[in-house]
């Protein structure tokens, strides 16, 4: 991952974003707030946060003190101390929320949806946890109970992120689906947690077919072979979730503030979008008709 390429893209975006007057910079009496002079621009802070998730460091403190305050001073000569940098992180929340929208891929007609549980503390510390009090909730995933959030992701067959949203941990997976897929078409593959006749009809009216596995107590229904094969390839989005947790450090339980925690999650997703090679289905088969090409690619990958 080229840090110069990342910084140039972020800096161009920030210049366009910050060029327009923002109501957040105006106080109640109509006067602009005096901002404290800092040695780093917002784009530089965002770049450092994103590059951390592409490094091999497990904690940001070790990354900043070992990498940025050492060799990193060549690219960022105005680096402050670690404590001061942590204080600057909340300023990137709104720009990062806007920037992640520019990193989305293009719909292709084949989409996969899933939710990623993100813990913010150990279960034994739930009652004493205060950073995300009122925001995080208890939820249950495939690995058991947790306290935190759910990151809902929609990707295409190339592993590109098409939509994402963050909800409390007790949110039903089906609730944010309509908002996430409002601009999509074709087929949407999910697990049994998205099984709903009402949701299927709503998406069908938007030219989007929801395809999930049936529960054991439900009657079997005929399904095209192609849809059945692609449904087995839903592990593609699970690979993306695995990379967000184990390559990008999206899950962290020692955030000093709620804003810093949300920034860390967004930066992890942005870092994933910069990966040169993402988990994907190879649909480049050139023999046979288009249906056979798609089926062969789905079977072999």
Image (cartoon, rainbow, N blue to C red):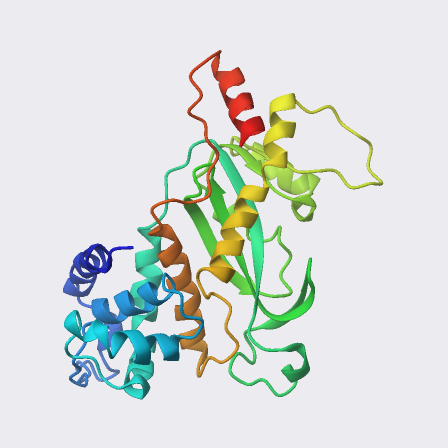
Please state the horizontal and vertical placement of residue 111, each as a whole percent of the image: 50, 38
Vertical placement of residue 92 versus 7, above or below: below
182 or 122, which is in the foreground?
122
Residue drawn where x is 45% and y is 13% of the image: 287
Residue drawn where x is 53% and y is 78% of the image: 132
Please state the horizontal and vertical placement of residue 5, each as a whole percent of the image: 21, 54
208 or 114, which is in the foreground?
114
Give residue 233's quadrant in the image.
Answer: top right
On screen, residue 181 versus residue 148, left or right, reads left
Vertical placement of residue 57 versus 276, above or below: below
On screen, residue 125 versus residue 73, left or right, reads right
182 or 46, which is in the foreground?
46
On screen, residue 42 versus residue 93, left or right, reads left
Where's the N terminus, which quadrant? Answer: bottom left
167 or 249, which is in the foreground?
249
Residue drawn where x is 44% and y is 62% of the image: 248
Please state the horizontal and vertical placement of residue 225, each as a whole percent of the image: 65, 22
Please state the horizontal and vertical placement of residue 133, each as a whole percent of the image: 56, 81
């Amino acid at each position: 991952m080229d840090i110069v390429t990342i910084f140039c893209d972020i800096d161009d975006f920030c210049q366009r974003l910050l060029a327009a007057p923002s109501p957040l910079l105006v106080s109640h009496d109509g006067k602009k707030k005096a901002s404290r002079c800092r040695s780093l621009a917002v784009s530089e802070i965002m770049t450092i946060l994103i590059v951390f998730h592409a490094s091999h460091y497990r904690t940001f403190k070790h990354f900043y003190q070992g990498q940025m305050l050492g060799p990193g001073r060549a690219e960022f000569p105005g680096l402050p101390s670690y404590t001061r940098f942590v204080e600057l992180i909340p300023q990137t929340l709104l720009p990062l929320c806007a920037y992640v929208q520019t990193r989305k891929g293009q719909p292709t007609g084949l989409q996969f949806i899933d939710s990623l549980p993100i813990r913010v503390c150990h279960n034994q510390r739930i009652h004493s946890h205060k950073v995300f009090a009122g925001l995080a909730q208890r939820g249950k995933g495939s690995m058991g109970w947790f306290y935190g959030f759910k990151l809902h992701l929609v990707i295409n067959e190339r592993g590109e992120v098409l939509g994402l949203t963050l909800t409390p941990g007790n949110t039903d997976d089906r609730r944010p689906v309509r908002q996430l897929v409002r601009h999509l078409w074709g087929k949407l593959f999910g697990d049994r947690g998205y099984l709903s006749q009402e949701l299927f009809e709503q998406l069908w009216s938007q030219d989007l077919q929801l395809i999930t596995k049936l529960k054991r107590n439900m009657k079997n229904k005929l399904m095209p072979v192609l849809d059945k094969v692609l449904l087995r390839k839903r592990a593609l989005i699970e690979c993306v979730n695995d990379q967000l947790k184990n390559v990008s450090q999206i899950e962290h339980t020692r955030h000093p503030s709620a804003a810093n925690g949300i920034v860390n999650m967004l930066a992890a997703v942005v870092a994933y979008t910069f990966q040169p090679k993402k988990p994907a289905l190879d649909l480049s088969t050139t023999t046979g008709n288009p249906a056979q090409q798609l089926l062969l690619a789905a079977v072999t990958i």
